[in-house]
Amino acid sequence: MANGFVSSEGTMAVEDVAEEIISELCWASFFQDIEKDDLGKVRGFKIHDLLHDLAQYVMGDLCCIVNDEMPIEHPKRIRHLTMGPCARNQIISACTFRSLRTFHFRQTNCALASTKILGPLESLRAFDLGYANVLNMLHLPLITPFNHLRYLNLRGTSIQTLPESTSSLCNLQVLNLSYCQSLRRLPRHLKYLKALRHLYLRGCRSLVYMPNEIGQLNSLRTLNIYIVGKKKGLRLDELAQLCLRGELHIKNLERVTNAADAKEANLMGKQLDVLKLSWGRNEQSKLLQNVDQILEALEPHPKLIDLGVGGYQGMYFPQWMGNPHLKNLCSIKLVDCWYSQQLPLLGRLPSLKILAICCMHNLRYVDDESYDGGVARGFQSLMCLELCCMPNLEGLSKEEGGDMFPGLSKMNVIACPRLTFPALPSVRKLCIAKGRRRSGHDLFSREILLSQCPSTTRSPNQVQMDSIHSLSCLEILEIHDDQELASFPKGTLQGLCRLRQLHIHHQSKMEVLPLELANNAALQELHIIGCHNLESLTDQVLTGLQSLQKLKIFKCDKFKGLSTGFQSLSSLKDLIISFCPQMVALAEDLQHMPPMLQSITLHELKNLECLPYCWGSTMTLQSLYIACCPKLKSLPISVGWFNGLNSLTYIVLAYRNNSRRKQGRIGNGLSTFQMLILEKIVG
């Protein structure tokens, strides 16, 4: 677009033409390894080496990529220049190329701060300064004389404001400010950028208000964020005439006082893929009397794919949210809808795959609909369900049945103390947590979800764990952040014959692992993190884990070591023990190491003094990492062991106290390895 390679054709907009070209190139296999976003749009790709060489041959000297100190050849012929980390004189030289059309900095250099350094680039069409950490407002006035500039990328920079002179870039079509997290305001006269088609503002969390009369940008197609104001020119009706596409997040809807203004925004006429509607958490939002009608008037286009509603203070949701005509809607997130007692009929949405509900304190059931005989239950396509901070939630459905949620494979449950699980044979992964308080800036971010969890001394995990056995096909189980749970309820893991991974995180009172683990023949990974009262893994548990391949123990303050049952882990490949200050030895009276062990990591074990002498029998070891174990004085490895160690390829010995670090990659010979071991023993 910026260089005129793609233009509109007849009634087709230039963006549609570009997407059609990309589709044809993908179909013809010109593009390979195509990466797409959640909405199915192409975000990246590669081309074959032969096609790359052909493209370079066709372009000749028009394109140039410069790194380090390499010279720039044929400067007068270059039209498109990409510069990596370069010397100052190279950047100054490049800024004299009057014929330059595209200028891309992979890493901004301080040389840009020089006055007038960019002045000669008067023919520039595209300027890319994305993630330029040293860029600030002082540099931006240098760009404003570029009257031909059509594309300006300031993504991820630290700018706080854009200069008012930016409004003079009369040919600018694309302004990318995504993830400029310090950006607080846009130019007041942005309305004069009549050619602007795409204004990217995703992740601009500090932005507090919009420029006046943004509705005059008749060409605008992308506007990620719109912040509703109180005065004329800043109200919601500014969106009325804009033909927006893609993603739109409307903030501060508490400033909309009547449904007529909301209707005038004409969201139905905008082909949006993603729509987020949020009300601020303030006294003004609590005083609204007609918030139900306002949300009803904000009905989106039927092709919507992703919907988020946050801070809504109404008691009932509009009917359009459960309308089957939203046949493309596959993701819904509802946050901080405190007064709502019932969800819309979301089970009737034919394509709904992801549903996240947080802080609906009065909700009792996810599916509150009644079903007559012969009528198929709802949520037939749902795959992922996240439930957070709902103290009164009792169940997933008011009417249980064997055909409920047939496609549900993943569940996250956070701070829902009364919720029990029905029989759900399709669920493969479950994460349950009591919830930790965090801070966040975005109403729809995961951080803010956790920060709204009600504080309680109850153990919500206990309730869910009593019914985990109903999830008979569970493969991955994660249990997080319950400071009250001392042990697993009896029967928690009973019948989970397909369980492959068990993650136990931050259960500070847990002293022993459930003996039922010994009967689990399928378990392959066991992660224990932040269980500060756990002292050891008993023989009763370890001897039954014949399929265990990975064992990780991290930040367990009282953990002292493994029992002799460790040697019976016949399938173990990876062992990781880190930040366990009470651990003195790996295991006592160990006769031999697991026969399949390939990787050992011992890190931040301040009191580790010795390792078992049977270590020398580990002939399959490929990776050894020992770091920050100040009391470990020697390794129990005989010189004869080196002759049998043909598998070891990587070793690291790190010392914190004298800031030395040794590492090596071992080929066929073992001389480097021997040197490292001997240096550790002697030093």
Image (cartoon, grey):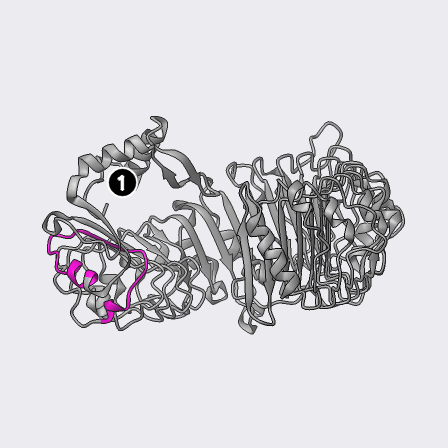
Q: Where is residue 65 in the image (x, y as percent from the top left)?
A: 25, 49
Nearer to us in this view, 418 or 312: 418
Residue 87, above or below 400? below
Relative to the observer, which residue lies in front, 494 or 526?
526
Residue behind mark 1: 13
**Magenta span covers which residues?**
90-113
Q: Does the magenta stretch include residue 221?
A: no
At a point 62% along the width and 58% down the height, the residue shown is 678
Amino acid under disc 1: Ala
> Looking at the rendering, in which quadrant would you find the N terminus?
top left
Q: Residue at x 25, y 67 (%)?
A: 189
Front-most of residues 1 and 669 = 669
Q: Which residue lies furthest to the front in this view?
A: 640
Q: Is residue 336 visible?
A: no
Q: Is residue 284 in view from this perspective? A: yes
Q: Where is residue 343 in the image (x, y as percent from the top left)?
A: 65, 49
Kind of element beneath mark 1: loop
